[in-house]
Image (spheres, rainbow, N blue to C red):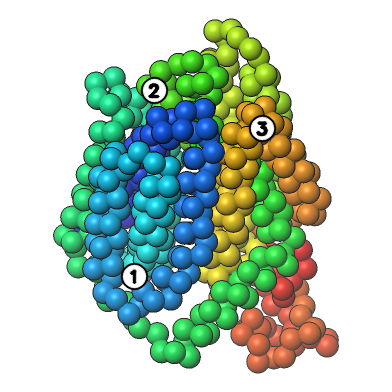
Amino acid sequence: MLTVLRNRAYRHLFTAQVVALVGTGLATVALGLLAWDIAGDRAGSVLGTALAIKMVAYVVLAPLITALADRLPRRALLVGADAVRGGVALALPFVDQVWQVYVLIFVLQAASAAFTPTFQAVIPDVLPDERDYTRALSLARLAYDTESLLSPALAAALLTAISYNWLFVGTSAGFVASAALVVSVVLPKGRRAPDAERERVRTKATAGMRLFLATPRLRSLLLMDLAVAAAGALVLVNTVVYVRDHLGLGAGDVPVALGAYGAGSMVLALLLPKVLDRTGDRAVMLTGALTLPVVFVAAAGVTLAGSGDWRWPVLLVIWAAFGAACSTVLTPVGRIIRRSTSPTDRASVFAAQFSLSHACWLAAYPLAGWLGATAGLPAAVIALAVLCLVSAVLAVRAWPADTERDQHMDEEHAHVHTGLPQSHPHLLGAVAYGEGFQHTHAHRADHLHAA
């Protein structure tokens, strides 16, 4: 996997991604503590709204910005987005009103909505070989998991010597370093698509959404994304409320709790490849989804407990269990999409997954924050637990139980298409067979194949 780092341009871009992620993780911890200082026990509501704003930026602005991105030089766009994010991070320590937090978070996430799709589009041009690009995708996933563990641990260490406001300085430094690394390499020039091509891309993106919703296992994935969002929202929005208000602990314990969540996720991500080889994606992912409501029961117990030193270590175990169960669902996502789509549809379906999964988080974040602030933490836990349970049960029903097929989707299957014209691109190389055309490829479930 690490051989791809021999490519200088990719090595610099990957390092830029890592330092920006670490900075973002520091901001996540600092933002929770800032919300506590401004809003006290209503910090969960503030964080829920701020994170909802982030999701709106990703879901709404990212497609719009991406449509305009081919009109701008890639490197200038990436560096400009990093500069905006760094400036916002430096401004956050000086706010003293909730609305100011919301405005700055919107600007920061709008810049991220410009940076992330552009960065993702650059990588396949830097690494045109498919095997190298696949390794890059694996490294990117590892970077995200590492950030969820490293940033809270780093924040906890820093908070022993400095106030949380200085964490925003670290965030800004991460974005500055990211910009410098982008400037240090020559990026391939993006090809500006003609108007007709851009319209075709937009149409294909819509088709990807339709295909995602029409495929049984992908509909199940969407429901599992909602279950994961319910659990993740409780952790990311209300950790500061649990630690500071419910348990009465210090600021330095907030990143410890977030780190427990990240540790659980990383451990499962490292263990899953061998498990998937033996068990199959359906059994693993649905087990993770059904585990989440069970963990919610334990979370409700800690929430309702009035006192006791035992609550802190138990909360860490619960947060780690949430991270592990979420990772069980999320780690195989790429395998499911790859196996459920044809190469020509794959990019649009990945885009649909990005948009729909962020929409799930957009629904869960305000529920975790606003309900917790208005009706109390127990009400928020119960509501999110019900949402998680319903989503997980529906996910099981949406994914047909065909264990043998799910375990051997990489094996090639001969089959006949009777409803397609011979000129259809999917039938390239197929031979006439009865009233249709026969060919052989690995099983997939899409608009051309049964689930």
Q: Are marks 1 and 2 in contact (CB under 8 Å)?
A: no
Which three-letter amino acid code belongs to the residue tagged 2?
Ala
> Residue 352 appears in which quarter of the rendering?
bottom right
Q: Label 1 belongs to which residue?
A: 125
| Residue 354 rendering spot, x and y as whole percentages | 54, 59
For mark 2, does the 10 Å Cα neighbourhood hold few (<14), some (14 to 19), or many (20 or more) residues? many
Q: Nearer the viewer, residue 405 or 362?
A: 362
Q: Residue at x 64, y 21 (%)?
A: 303
Q: Residue at x 65, y 87 (%)?
A: 424
For mark 3, does the 10 Å Cα neighbourhood hold few (<14), some (14 to 19), or many (20 or more) residues? few
For mark 1, does the 10 Å Cα neighbourhood hold few (<14), some (14 to 19), or many (20 or more) residues? some
Q: CA distance from mark 3 to mark 1?
A: 50 Å
| Residue 259 visible in the picture | no
Q: CA distance from mark 1 to mark 2?
A: 43 Å
The relative height of residue 311 versus residue 180 in the rendered view (above or below) is above
> Residue 416 appears in which quarter of the rendering?
bottom right
Q: Residue at x 71, y 37 (%)?
A: 383
The relative height of residue 334 versus residue 433 in the rendered view (above or below) is above
Numbered disc in front, either 3 or 1 = 3
Q: Label 2 belongs to which residue?
A: 251
| Residue 324 rendering spot, x and y as whole percentages | 57, 33
Which three-letter amino acid code belongs to the residue tagged 1?
Asp
| Residue 269 rendering spot, x and y as whole percentages | 51, 39
| Residue 333 rendering spot, x and y as whole percentages | 58, 52
Circle number at residue 375: 3
Quadrant location of the C terminus? bottom right
Which three-letter amino acid code belongs to the residue tagged 3?
Ala
